[in-house]
Image (cartoon, helix red, strand yellow):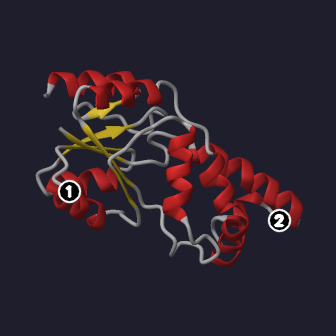
Amino acid sequence: MRIGIDLDDTICRTTEIVHDRIEKYAALENLNPLDIMNDEALKEGFFRVYLEDIYANVEIKHEVTNVLKRIRNRGNEIYIITARSSNFVSTVKNVRNITAEWLKKHDIEVDEIIVASYGDKKAEMCKKYHIDLMIDDDPYNYKKIIATGTKCLLFDDREKYNLKDDYVTNWLQVEKYIERNR
């Protein structure tokens, strides 16, 4: 089985580190933290300073490494398909390398890292790479992906969505789903 996996807020805790770094940036720049993400210039300034740090130091979610090792050891292929992009902030040129280093640091082996994929582009990449199952935390991506006929699990360990089908809240549930649907 070819399994596509989103990165930020799916296998790592990106929202938490972003909030932490916003607080630090706001204190350094004497800004209101709420203004940073609502003003394009402030947001760009924040990401110019912190994006590489966020990508390199984001915390991994519980059980991810163990589950992905077991999934891979059962003959499945793993593709990271992420919206991370060098175009997001011009100062971060090596998104793929930063991501590869982060995965290596957490002992996660993958077959491919595909960047700059969100919405229709992520759905297109699922088709292009013949992904059998995509795991993503974004309902917009979920809708775009299933519209192309690719199976998708909506990952939500923060219980933001109240859904029943194709919905998982931890990595052990992901593993069970994959085993049931082989």
Query: Alpha-carbon neighbours of circle 1 within 10 Å: few (<14), some, or many (≥20)?
Result: some
Q: The residue tagged with tag 2: helix, strand or loop?
A: loop
On screen, residue 38 above or below 2: below
On screen, residue 160 above or below 20: above
Query: Where in the figure is residue 75, as x and y percent of width and height?
Result: 22, 31
Q: Is residue 126 left or right of residue 64?
A: left
Q: Residue at x 51, y 26 (%)?
A: 62
Residue 111's disc number: none
Residue under label 1? 129
Q: Quadrant of the C terminus?
A: top left
Q: Is residue 139 left or right of residue 131?
A: right
Between 31 and 168, the one nearer to me in the picture:
168
Query: Alpha-carbon neighbours of circle 2 within 10 Å: few (<14), some, or many (≥20)?
Result: some
Q: Residue at x 46, y 29 (%)?
A: 65
Three-letter amino acid code of the residue under disc 1: Tyr
Q: Quadrant of the N terminus?
A: top left
Query: Where in the figure is residue 154, as x and y percent of width and height?
Result: 32, 40
Alpha carbon separation for disc pair 1 and 2: 43 Å
Query: Where in the figure is residue 177, as x and y percent of width and height?
Result: 23, 26
Which badge, 1 or 2, comes first in the chain's sequence? 2
Residue under label 2? 31
Q: The residue tagged with tag 1: helix, strand or loop?
A: loop
Q: Please say if the residues under marks 1 and 2 sit with CB atoms less than 8 Å apart.
A: no
Q: Residue at x 61, y 70 (%)?
A: 92
